[in-house]
Structure formats: C-alpha cells, structure tokens
Image (spheres, grey):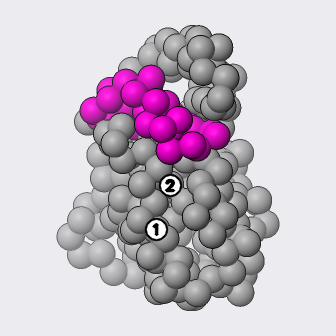
Amino acid sequence: MKILADYHTHTKYSHGAGTIEENVLKAIELGIKKIGISDHGYKHLLYGIKLDDIFKMREEIDKLNEKYNQIDILLGMECNVLDDKGNIDTNDKVLEVCDYIMAGYHFGSTPISFDSLMNHFNNSTIKGKKAKEYNTKAIINAMKNNDIFIITHPGDKGEVYIEEVAKVAKDTNTNLEINSSHGFLTVEQLKKIKDINCNFIVGSDAHKPSDVGNFDVAIDIIKKSKIDVSYVKNIVL
Ligand SMILES: [Zn+2]
Ligand SMILES: [Zn+2]
C-alpha cells in the first residue's frame, strides 16, 4: 500500500502528544508526501485549540514547508458539528489561514442550543431514532452549508442514517473518512453505501507522532467491506 496523504493528525495544540514538526518527521520517515495538521475546533470544551493559536500554527507550518521540501505540510482543522442547522465552529479568519477543514461530531463540543445539548445527552444515553435523525441532519446540513473537505468518523458517538449522509457527500463533493483510530466508517456502513459512489479518505487520527500514517484498522475495514478502492482517494492499494 502507498499512502499519498494523511490529513488527520493532532498535536499539542489540542490534545495530541507531539509537536507539528514531530508529526512531519514521522510522515517523512514513512515516505508520505503530504501531511495535514488538523487539531480540534475551538468549540470543543476539553480539547479545542485556542483560537489565536491557528495563526501561530500557520506560521510554524510555513517555516516547516521551507525546511522540509520533500513533503507538503497543510494546515487543517477538525471542526465540531454543533447542531442540526449545519453550524460548525469555524469563521472567516480561520478559513483564510487553513488549507482545508474537516468536521465531525464530538461529545465535548459546546452546546449552542437547548436541542444540541439534549442531543449530546441522547447520544450518550438513550440513543434511538430521535438522536439518529438529529445527527444525520446535523452532518448533512454541515456539508451543505460549509466547504468541508472530510467528514471525520461518520456515525461515531452519534449514529447516523449513513445512506443519506453518503448521498449528500456525493452531491456536495465531500469525502467521508475511514478513521483508523475510531473504526468509523465501519464495514457494515461501507457495505450499505458502496453503490452510492461517494469518495473516501483514510485518516490515522494520530494523537501521537508514532501513529501518523498508521492506517492498519482502516485497511482491514476496507478489505472486509470489499468497496471499490478507487474511491479511496489518499491510498494506492
Ligand atoms: Zn474526531
Ligand atoms: Zn481527530
């Protein structure tokens, strides 16, 4: 397998263990030509980056791009899907400095309405149809209202109707992630959507430098689901 890019890696700027440069060095060691630094959006109560840090990260990445010309280093952000209206934690200034944004649902994101608070509660307790409908709407509207490159770990922590998500992903040209840390998309989800022909990206979701480019779990899922690998855009199997 050849890894063309790993767009999903965390650093000390959120709750990763390493620095940007340490993630880059691991990617270089593996021969990866493109790495994305994508820390948690600022509306995550526990792990969100400090909003001003995104500008520091941009400067750091610009310098590292000059230092290491064998690799392309990108600045991303893993925004939080905040409610069913399609709100995510980004703003014009963030979009201006980032090369791309991703978005995913996380328990620790700041509730921005009573319904979004209740949805966190439902996802962690009752689960069920109401939560599944809310989560599906949240991701679909996030894709429609924002220019999102990748939806991270779809269905993790909050179940979704994956066929509906995949159809909108195809229409909006959004990649769905096969996340190698969380194991979402799952084999079962991929089997349900393999004829929708949306694109996929594998992400390590590395929280320490040694996990950058570790796609083992995702590769296993891809093989078991028997999807057409030409739709997985950042690996060559
Ligand atoms: Zn995540
Ligand atoms: Zn992540």
| Residue 160 visible to the viewer | no
In the figure, residue 171 lies in which quadrant? bottom right
Residue 130 picture location, percent across and down: 40, 76
Residue 47 picture location, percent across and down: 30, 35
Q: Specify which label sits upstream in the sequence, 2 or 1.
A: 2
Asked if the residue at tag 1 contacts the one at tag 2, i.e. Cβ–Cβ closer than 8 Å, the answer is yes
Q: Residues within 10 Å of mark 2 (few under 14, many from 20)?
A: many
| Residue 99 visible to the viewer | yes
Q: Which residue is mark 1?
A: 218
Q: Is residue 195 above or below residue 68?
A: below
Query: Which quadrant holds the C terminus?
Result: bottom right
Q: Residue at x 61, y 58 (%)?
A: 2
Residue 11 picture location, percent across and down: 37, 31
Q: Is residue 86 above or below residue 154?
A: above
Q: Residue at x 67, y 75 (%)?
A: 229
Based on the picture, tell me whether residue 33 belongs to the magenta stretch: yes
What number is the disc on residue 99? none
Residue bounds of the magenta highlight = 10-38
Q: Which residue is mark 2?
A: 203
